[in-house]
Amino acid sequence: MRHFHVLAAASAALALALASAAPAQAAPREFFGVVPQQSLPVSDIERMAQGKVGTVRLQLFWPNVETTDDSFDWSAYDELIGNLAAEGIRPFPFLLGVPDFVSADALRLPVGSAGDKAQWEEFVTEALERYGPGGEYWENPSLYPSQHPGEDPKPVKSVQPWNEENAPKHTHPEPSVPDYGELVKITHSAATAVDPDVEIVLGGMFGRPTGGGAIDAWKFLKRLYGVSGIRGAFDSVALHPYAPGLKGIEDQFERIREVLKKKGDRQVRTWVTEIGWGSSGQSSSRLVKGVSGQAKLLKQSFKLFLEQRGKWKIAGVQWFAWRDLGAADAPCDWCASAGLFEKTGFDFKPAWQRFTKLTGGKP
């Protein structure tokens, strides 16, 4: 009888352990992603693969590709996207920036004239024709097949037009709902002409941005539905729900989902294309939590996203950022220490251990 109770207790413990792990196991590898702040050497990408990172959100910066009109140089992105794919990691690009032959301001949305719109449409088309399913980079024998022989392609399946379009830091002179709506429609038309199945994901919206002209994410989304022809021009919404703790994240998600419900778009998915906290820096920052606090919040936030995956229709979550950055180069007061790894890339933080426990990878 004693043995029976021991076995029953062991079975119950095992069942409880499996139940608690079920949400993470049910999520596909591509649910778990990261966002780099700097260039990615092969050693970093190999480390990502070891940790079972599924997606990498990368900036596809138009001025770096087309420095002069109709002259495209994809070589730098070929190397990055090829190295990711060879390790089984899906590239998830956000398309950003305007070359100087279109505008003197690289962050002004290219919708001011018919010429500007045509230029953006061409850029989107070229990007999908190169990296989408059956794209030139994957099919040309002198490109991916020879660079990574025997490795399966990982074509781009999801694209984001712009980034934090509701924040003045990324959209000049200030956020404009009508202009962004026009950009989304052009992106949809160009991208689906190349790949009818491509997922158009709205640029990741900062939940509560600050500065002149800033618009809260849910207000921006609500106004976006007022743009003629926008319905059906995007498949998913992306959120950057930065907050000191889980309560703030939950509030932002509920607000976004409420807008979608009221607009009759319950089926629209939600991506978290940035979430993170710093491990050191200005103690006054609401997003600096210390080394252990960063790890704790990674675990808690990903657990929340997994638990609410069905209700909030979450397609994936991407941690910002992969590695720390020098303070002088950091775009915000906590970004310098947002990485899962120290600046050198050699030493990982407890947050990376938490991440790999969720993915089933190795730190």
Image: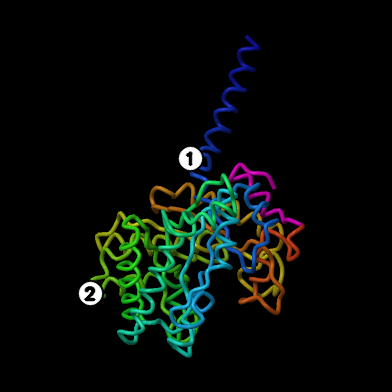
Q: What colour scheme has been applied to the protein in the rendered image?
A: rainbow
Q: Which mark is residue 228?
A: 2
Mark 1 packing: few (<14 Cα in 10 Å), some, or many (20+)? few
For image coordinates 48% across by 56% down, the residue present is 140
Instruction: Magenta stretch: give its range.
Output: 347-363
Indicate the position of residue 326 as horizontal and vertical percent values: 72, 74
Q: Is residue 297 above or below residue 288?
A: above
Q: Mark 2 vs mark 1: give the one in front.
A: 2
Amino acid type for the residue under numbered disc 1: Ala
For image coordinates 35% across by 75% down, the residue present is 183
Residue 159 in view in this figure: yes
Indicate the position of residue 150 as horizontal and vertical percent values: 57, 44
The mark that comes first in sequence, 2 or 1, is 1
For image coordinates 25% across by 74% down, the residue present is 226
Q: Which residue is mark 1?
A: 26
Residue 209 in view in this figure: no
Foreground pick, 279 / 47: 47
Indicate the position of residue 92 as horizontal and vertical percent values: 49, 60
Amino acid type for the residue under numbered disc 2: Ser
- Is 214 one of the magenta-colored residues? no
| Residue sitting farthest toward the left | 228
Secondary-structure class at tag 1: helix
| Residues marked 2 and 1 touching at CB (< 8 Å) | no
Q: Which mark is residue 205?
A: none
For image coordinates 51% across by 81% down, the residue present is 67
